[in-house]
Image (cartoon, rainbow, N blue to C red):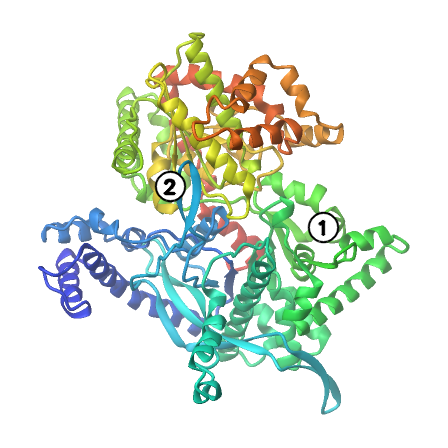
Amino acid sequence: MDGDAIRRSFVQHVEYTLAKDEYSATPRDLYASLAYSVRDRLCDRWNRTQQRYHREDVRRVYYLSLEYLVGPLLDSALINLGIDHEARAALRDLDIDVDEIARQEDDPGLGNGGLGRLAACFLDSMATLGLPAMGYGIRYEYGIFRQAIVGGEQEEHPDTWLRYPNPWIIPRPESLFRVRFGGRVETRREGDRDVRVWLSTDDVLAMAHDIPVPGYQNDVVNTLRLWGAKATRELDVAKFSQGDYVEAMCEKTATENLARVLYPNDKVAFGRELRLKQEYFFVSATLQDAIRRHLAENETVATLGDKAVFQLNDTHPAVAVVELMRLLVDERGLGWDAAWAVTGQCFAYTNHTVMPEALEEWPVALFERLLPRPLEIVYEVNRRFLRDVRARFPGDEARVQRVSIIYEGGERRIRMAHLAIVGSFSVNGVSALHSRILRQRLFPDFAEMFPGRFGNQTNGITPRRWLRQCNPWLSDLVSSRIGDGWVRDLDQLRGIARHADDPEFRAAWRAAKRAAKQRLVDFVQKQKTMELRLDAGALFDVHVKRIHEYKRQTLALLHAVMVHRRLRSGVETRTPRVLLFAGKAAPGYAMAKRIIRLINDVAATINADPATSDRLKILFLPNYGVSLAQIIIPAADLSEQISTAGSEASGTGNMKLALNGALTIGTLDGANVEIREAVGPENLFAFGLTEEEVEARRRSGYRPRDCVDADPELAATLAALSAGEFSPSGPEAAREVVSALIERDPYLVLADFAAYRDCQRRVEAAFADQEAWTRMSIANVAQMGRFSSDATIAGYAREIWRTL
C-alpha cells in the first residue's frame, strides 16, 4: 500500500496491461493504469469479503434499483482504501498529476437523477458498515443522454460512456441467466398436481458485470452487479446458412438492445414496452442469481426469507414480487401458500415519490403480451388479497376498488405500488413528511390495513464523496480542528460548533469557501460555449436538480427578472449575485424543455446588460451529473430547495449543499423540514405554503390570476416576459411558460412568489454581514450528522433488514 508499491504497479500496467511506454501513453492510458493499480488492491479484499460472507452463511441484502449514479470511481476508491495521499505522491515523482488524469474518467451512465445517486450513496454506506449487501441493476451501454445547450435549447446526444474499456467493470460470463418474454401458458399434469408451463418464449440471456464497492478503510469490498443482455445464440444458423446473414445479425442485435439505453421515452408505445422489459429482465436475473447463491449455502428455497431481503428502490423493481412467486411455484415446486409466505418475508419497498407520473402503472394488455405467466400470478395475488379485504371490510366495495392491484376504470392497468405494498413486509418513505403523506394521503387504506408495515427512513448522503472528496478545502479545515473521524461518523461534525466564535476559524472557513468558488469560476471560464466572467465574491445562488415544474426553477427565474427590473429602475443596489441553474429535462417533457429555453434566454439578456452586469448574472451549466455537482456544490452560498410543499419526497441535493456550508432557502417540503429542525429555524430561510395549506388552496379552487392581480410587481414581471423583453431568440418559450403559470400553475409558483421575494430580502441582509453568515454556515455543517447515508443505512439494517 506504500508509494513505491503503487508506483511499481502503475508502471507495470502501463507496460504490460496497456502495452505502452512513457512516449506513447496518453492521459487516458495513465488514468487506466492507475485505476488498474487501485483495482488490484481492491481484488484481494473483494475476494476475502465474499468468501467470509459465504463461510458465515450471512443474511444478505439485495438492493434492486434501475439506477446507480455512482460517479467517477477512481478518487472514491483511493479515499476508501486510504491511499489517496500515497498515490498522489507516488505519481508526482513521475511528474504525473493524479487530478489531471482522473478527469479522463467518464461518469458511468447508469442513472438519471436523485434516485440513482441515492442508490450509490447507499452502496457506499453498506460497505462502510460492513453489511453483506449487493446492488443489482442494468449495465446500460448508453446513459440517459449527454445534454448540450444549443441556441438556448436542450439537445440530447448519446452518452457513450463505454466507448473506452472501463477498468472498474469485470465481466462474469459464467453468470448467465435466461429471462423469458412472450409465448403462451398451458396446464400440464406432473405427478399428482397440475402445473402451469410457460412455453414458446422469446428468451434473453442476462450476463453479470461486477463493480467493486469498497467500504471506508475497513477492508470490506461489496459488489454492484449489473446485467447486460445477450442473445441466446450468436446468430440464427438456419437463416445464416440460407444466406440471410443480415437478418440473422439483426435479430441478435435487437435482442441485445434491451440493455442498451437507460430509460427510453415511455410516452411512446415502443418506449413503454422496452422499459417494462428492462424492469422484468433485471429482476428476473437478480432473483435467479440470489436463489442460486442461497442454494449453494442452504438446502431449500423455503428458508430464503431467513437469509435474503430484497429492497425495492421505488416501483421499478416491483415486478420482482410476482417473479419470485413464479420461480418458487413453477420452477422450485413450492405450493402457493408456502411460496407466498417466503415472498412476504423477502421484500421491502421504498417509495420515493408522491408524483402521479412516478407511481408506475402498466397496461394489462401490454403485460399480457410480454409477461403472460407473471400476469396470471398478478391476478391470483390480487384475487386472494381482495378476498381478505372483503372479509375484513364487508360491503365496502369502494375500498376494494381503491386498493385493488388491478385498476379497472377505462384502460385496465396494474398498479405497481399496490403490488409492492401487498407483497412486502415493510414500506417506507424517505423523510418524515413524505412518510406521513404516504400514510395519510397516498395509501391510507393500506396503512389502515397494515399499520405495522409503514415506517420512515430519512434519506442521507455519503460524507466520503460529498465532503471529503469534493471539497478538500473545507474537509481539511474541519479535520485540522476535530480530526478526521467525521468521515466515518458524521455526528462528530458537532465538534466544529465550538469553533464558530473563533475569528481565525471563521476567516479560514470563508477562505475555504472562496477556494471552492474560484474553482467553479475557473471551470466556467474554460467552457468554450460561455464568455462569462464571474466574481467569486458574489453570492452564489444555486438551483441544481432535474428540470421539472414541481422543482420550480420558474420561481427563482421570476425573482431574477424582478431583481433585474429593480436594478434597471434604480430602486435598490443589491449584493452581487450569481444565479446558477443546472439539470436535465426528460426528452419527452416539453414544458421542462421550455423552462430551459427560458432560463437561457433570460440569462443572455441579463448578462449582456452593462447596467446590471456587476450585480446580477445568470448561467445554465449543461450536462449536470456527479462530476459537475462535485464542482458546483462546494461553491454554493445559497441552496435553492423550493419545491411545492408536499411534492418532494426527500431531496438529497439539499443535504449535499448544506454539508458543504451553503445556507438553504426552501419550503417546508421533503427533508427540508428535518434540516430546519436540525440546524435551527434561525439558520435556514424558510418560506411559502405548508403541505396542508397547499392542499387547502387546491381544494378551495386555486386561481393563479388572483395572485397576479394582487401583486403589481409580479404582474409587471410576467408581462415583461410575455412581451419578449427577455427573449432574444424569440418569445415563444416565455409566453408558453407564463401562460401555463397564469392559467394552470399546478405547483403554486405564483401563490408562493411574494413569500419567496420577502425571503430573498432576508437572504440579502444576512449575506451582507459575512461574520454572521459564516456562523450560520458553520451551524449548518455542524448539525448534518443525522443526514449521513451511514445513519440511514443503519436504520434500514436495524429496523427492516435485521442485519445489525
Residue where numbered disc 2 is placed: 629
Left or right side of 237 for 339: right
The residue lying toward the viewer, choosing from 7 and 323, is 323
The part of the image, by quadrant, that contains residue 131 is bottom left
Per the model, the C-alpha gap separating discs 1 and 2 is 39 Å
x%, y% of residue 311?
Answer: 55, 59
Query: Is residue 218 positioned above or below 571 on the image?
Result: below
Query: Is residue 783 positioned above or below 326 on the image?
Result: above
Residue where numbered disc 1 is placed: 451
- Kindly identify the residue that appears in the image at 29 percent across and 68 percent down: 44
The part of the image, by quadrant, that contains residue 426 is bottom right
Left or right side of 642 for 426: right
Q: Residue type at mark 2?
A: Ala
Query: Is residue 570 positioned above or below 143 on the image?
Result: above
Query: Is residue 93 positioned above or below 503 on the image?
Result: below
**Residue 779 appearing in the image:** no
Q: Nearer the viewer, mark 1 or mark 2?
A: 2
Q: Which mark is residue 289?
A: none
Q: Residues within 10 Å of mark 1 (few under 14, many from 20)?
A: few
Q: Residue type at mark 1?
A: Pro
Left or right side of 401 for 362: left
- Of mark 1 and mark 2, the one earlier in the sequence is 1
Which residue reaches farthest bottom? 191
x%, y% of residue 312?
Answer: 57, 58
SS label for mark 1: helix
The part of the image, by quadrant, that contains residue 699 is top right
The residue lying toward the viewer, choosing from 198 and 667, is 198
SS label for mark 2: helix
x%, y% of residue 73?
Answer: 32, 54
x%, y% of residue 697?
Answer: 71, 28
